[in-house]
Amino acid sequence: MKREILISESAIQKRVREIADQISKDYKDAEPVVIGILKGAVFFMADLMRALSIPVKMDFIRAASYGSGTETSGTVRITKDIELPVEGKPVILIEDIVDSGLTLNHIRQLLEGRGAASLRICALIDKTERRERDISVDYCGFQVKEGFLVGYGLDCNEEYRYLPEIYVLKE
Ligand code: IMP
Ligand code: MG
């Protein structure tokens, strides 16, 4: 498939540092548990964590909602759970893209049910056009209205994740 560059590597890295500065201020005395949603958020989380100036704990969760291709299946299933306890802890969820909001809504409910003291959402991309659940993104990298994006962790059928920039796929 053809692709067009949407966000350059330097623009991503600049925005990552800005978000890291904000999180470092907001969680100065809190030591949050930062939970990355696999696999898409891996690069974003790795870059973000190294730009923080506060201590954090890290864990990962994996949810499946998309089958193959670009359409959501509508159901969310946890295929790998976190291992750290979150009860009484401030939690930051790191996601690659919020699209319909179904995935984050499911994970948010799960962690709130386990007694997280607070929960904020940090997403590289906030894609607003197809939102179905009321998810507010507390730390947002970039707002994008539409299109299927790949690169910097984002995939289409497991391709393109390794690219350091973000692209939009063209038919
Ligand atoms: P949801 O629709 O908000 O539940 O999004 C579910 C997942 O779909 C996200 O975690 C992304 O990994 C993936 N996703 C949504 N839009 C895109 C896209 O444009 N490119 C790549 N993955 C996407
Ligand atoms: Mg994903």
Image (tube, rainbow, N blue to C red):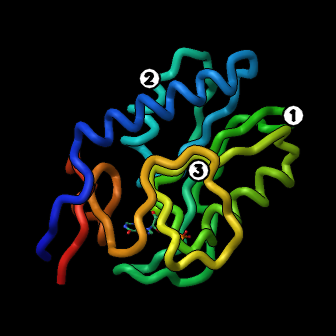
Q: Which residue is mark 3?
A: 61
Q: Which residue is mark 1?
A: 88
Answer yes or no: is residue 94 visible.
no
Callout in the foreground (1, 3): 1
- Name the residue rendered at 56%, 74% in the picture: 100
Q: Which residue is mark 2?
A: 51
- Tell which circle, 1 or 3, labels the residue nearer the N-terminal end: 3
Percent position of residue 26, x then y: 68, 27
- Name the residue rendered at 14%, 76% in the picture: 1
Q: Secondary structure beneath disc 1?
A: loop
- In space, the residues marked 1 and 2 are separated at their CA atoms by 25 Å
Percent position of residue 35, x then y: 60, 41
- In space, the residues marked 1 and 3 are separated at their CA atoms by 19 Å
Percent position of residue 110, x then y: 77, 57
Q: Is residue 74 above or below residue 156?
A: below
Which residue is outermost to the left? 2
- Tell which circle, 1 or 2, labels the residue nearer the N-terminal end: 2
- Name the residue rendered at 15%, 68% in the picture: 3
Are the residues at dot 1 and dot 2 in contact (C-beta closer than 8 Å)?
Answer: no
Callout in the foreground (1, 2): 2
- Tell which circle, 3 or 2, labels the residue nearer the N-terminal end: 2
